[in-house]
Image (cartoon, rainbow, N blue to C red):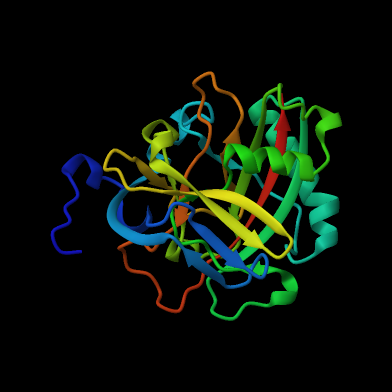
Amino acid sequence: MRGFRVSAPARQGAVAGLLNYSRRTAPQPALHSGGPGCPETIHGIADDPKWTVIRDGRRIADRLTLDEHGFRLLHCPTRVSDFESARQIKEIYEGEIATLLRLHTGARDVVVFDPTLRTSKPVAPASAGYRQPVLRVHSDFTDQSAAQTLRDLHHERRGGDPSRRFAILQVWRPLSESADSLPLALADASSVEESDLFTVRRVYPGWVGELAYVVHRPEHRWYWFPGMSRDEVVLFKVYDSSMNGTARRVVHTGFRPSMPHTATAHRESTEIRALAFY
């Protein structure tokens, strides 16, 4: 971290983190994989890691909004006792998340999908569907892949008409007390320009999708929420079709804070997505 300095105002409640930005090195960058959770082969993308100040979002949690910043910290206890249980996710968690999103977004309809478990343990139980945390600054959806998700989930008749506003939201929850060893960092959407993103094709057998990687710019403002409990979640936008100036997407990444933590600690977390129709 030689040469990296944190200014006095930023030092309060902030940590430094090495965020893995990207540079495009070919006209059509792509990730090739055997499927979700499988190793990926990267084409046309170079790593561009940058030491970055990541501010304590708890200090401004009461001022954060989905429309301006793109994310919020929320108190959200759950009745789920076992996040590896598909039955509990279907019968309990999806309903809890749908209720949460209706309350905090004003959406008239919510369709929950894609529950995911993540762990930083080198060997995770594949039978439970664990994946590794993503340690690259990214946005999960482009305009094209968001529209494709809408079609794939067959929800056009439930209000998913592309001429009407819809959003894809994500809810992230830590499951371990050691989540601070590899937490989630989110960039204030108002500090990120569309020109900072470039499209990456994700190629699986029989399926091609898109996501976006991010080029570094010093103006990006990053936040994290230290000491999160299992009863807290981060709600953030991964896509919004609105073009009226509201936050459209939040670029994010896992990162290792430059602070002491137990070397053997591993982060476990869960995330789930939802289509929100307005």
- Residue 42 location (% of width, % of height): 49, 66
Number of marks present in the image shown: 0
Seen from the viewer's position, the closer of residues 144 and 169 is 144
- Does residue 122 appear anywhere in the picture? yes
- Residue 73 location (% of width, % of height): 53, 41
Query: What residue is rendered at 51% in x and 53% in y?
Result: 228
Q: Is residue 143 above or below residue 163?
A: below
- In this view, the residue farthest toward the top is 244
Instruction: Classify residue 169 as left or right of residue 151.
Output: left
Question: What is the quadrant of residue 128 in the picture?
Answer: bottom right
Instruction: Classify residue 26 as left or right of residue 239.
Output: left
- Residue 111 location (% of width, % of height): 78, 39
The C terminus sits in image quarter: top right
Instruction: Classify residue 215 as left or right of residue 76.
Output: left
Question: What is the quadrant of residue 7 in the picture?
Answer: top left
Q: Is residue 235 above or below residue 90?
A: above
- Residue 196 location (% of width, % of height): 38, 41
- In this view, the residue farthest toward the front is 27
Seen from the viewer's position, the closer of residues 210 and 191 is 210
Query: What residue is rendered at 32% in x and 58% in y?
Result: 48
Instruction: Classify residue 158 as left or right of residue 275.
Output: right
Q: Is residue 36 above or below residue 155?
A: below
Seen from the viewer's position, the closer of residues 57 and 241 is 241
Query: What residue is rendered at 36% in x and 48% in y?
Result: 215
Seen from the viewer's position, the closer of residues 142 and 102 is 142
The N terminus sits in image quarter: bottom left
- Does residue 178 appear anywhere in the picture? no
